[in-house]
Amino acid sequence: MIVAQRKKIPEILEIVKEHKNVLVLGCGTCVTVCLAGGEREVSIISSALRIASKKSGKYIKFNEFTIERQCDNVFIEGAAEEIRKNDAVLSLGCGAGVQSIAERYPDKPVYAGLDTAFLGILESRGVWTEKCAQCGACLLADFGGICPVTRCAKHLLNGPCGGSREERCEISPDQPCAWQMIYKRLKDIGETDKINKLYPMKDWSKSLDGGCRIIIREDHRI
Ligand code: SF4
Ligand code: SF4
């Protein structure tokens, strides 16, 4: 899922300071799971913003609404009336959600209330870790399901850097060495022969191609 975290209240207040009525718009999917932008967070952030704006002497009315997914026009439509009634939208969706709303309402200022961080998983209560850099050409089949692009600090595809000590990463000793994990995993599943495969430099053209990537599923088009 997409993992994001809330911007600080003073930063948000600075962003919306020119408006009188601001819709704090939550998203009920990824950012709800990572406790950044669901209905509960909309309520908490709106309350904090009301207090902060009152204290600043320039009162802004913050209205609350949450939809199922901000990155899907079908659900955005459900917020049409609320968006219309307010001067601006403070989206608590991920970057894709913010842009969806902005595209849908070209005359309405739409601001990001979250910092979108990465694609990751819930590791333990309150802890999320990055697992995929969305490179556009997945290599997991060769690496025992452990991504060296994301989890090796040097993004190495052909074995470890040699700096690992006691199975920790040379760059970030608080993290395990991704290549130690890859080797152990390949050994456990009987696929150590894959370690001998030599990879050329990663072809980033599938990812950083100077524009946004588009996936079209012809079988789903109407
Ligand atoms: S190889 Fe690429 S697509 Fe696959 S998990 Fe790693 S970054 Fe994500
Ligand atoms: S110690 Fe391991 S994870 Fe860290 S940079 Fe070197 S190979 Fe990558």
Image: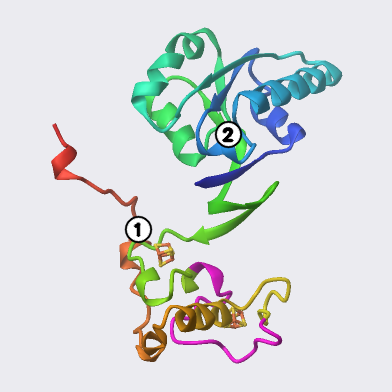
Coordinates of residue 188 in the picture (x, y in percent): 48, 80
Q: Position of residue 65 (x, y in %)?
A: 56, 17
**Mark 2 near ligand 1 (CB under 8 Å)?**
no
Check the picture and name the quadrant holding the C terminus: top left
- Image coordinates of residue 173 in percent, x first then y, are 72, 76
Give me the disc on residue 210: 1
221 left or right of 2 in image: left
* CA distance for labels 2 and 1: 31 Å
Residue 147's tag is none
Left or right: 104 as drawn, with respect to 43? left
Numbered label attached to residue 32: 2
Q: Is residue 142 magenta?
A: no
Relative to 37, is 212 above or below?
A: below
As helix, strand or loop, the secondary structure at mark 2 comes to helix
Give coordinates of residue 167: x percent, y percent: 66, 83
Task: Name the element at disc 1.
Answer: loop
Q: Find out whether residue 161 is within the magenta segment.
A: yes
In the image, which residues are magenta?
150-167
Residue type (three-letter) at the residue carrying disc 2? Thr
190 w.r.t. 30: above or below: below
Residue at (59, 29) in percent of width and height: 38
The answer to which image quadrant residue 74 occupies is: top left
Mark positioned earlier in the residue sequence (2 or 1): 2
Q: Is residue 105 visible?
A: no
Q: Nearer the viewer, residue 18 or 152?
A: 152
Query: Residue sitting at 52 percent across and 28 percent down?
Result: 28
Classified by dominant secondary structure, the portion drawn in magenta counts as: loop
